[in-house]
Amino acid sequence: KDALLDGRYEDVNHYEQKAPHARKAHPHPDHFFPLHVAIGAAGENSKAKLIHSSIEVGTLSYASYQFTSDSS
């Protein structure tokens, strides 16, 4: 969350090195890859905005982000 909102997208790209327990949260990256696609589609100098965040059953985190491009 902090990396996205601070624009540190390289940290997101290298999440397995930056977050030591990333494999526990995302054992298979296929659910995480759409985030990388959204970041790339937004283009250079895009900004992330958290538009939804909730936790279900005490452990399942749901978050939605909006990415705006520099030209928006």
Image (cartoon, rainbow, N blue to C red):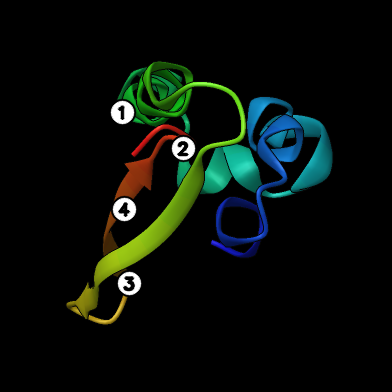
Check contact, mark 1 vs mark 2: CB within 8 A.
yes
Alpha carbon separation for disc pair 3 and 2: 13 Å
Considering every residue shown, the one lying at the far left of the view is 56
Q: Which residue is mark 2?
A: 26
Check contact, mark 3 vs mark 2: CB within 8 A.
no
| Three-letter amino acid code of the residue under disc 2 | His
Alpha carbon separation for disc pair 3 and 4: 19 Å
Tell me which residue sits at (32%, 72%) in the image.
59
**Taking 53 as reference, is 44 left or right?**
right
Tell me which residue sits at (17%, 78%) in the image.
57
Q: Which quadrant of the view contains residue 63?
A: bottom left
Alpha carbon separation for disc pair 1 and 2: 7 Å
| Three-letter amino acid code of the residue under disc 1 | His
Q: Secondary structure at mark 2?
A: loop
Q: Nearer the viewer, mark 3 or mark 4?
A: 4
| Three-letter amino acid code of the residue under disc 3 | Thr
Tell me which residue sits at (40%, 21%) in the image.
33
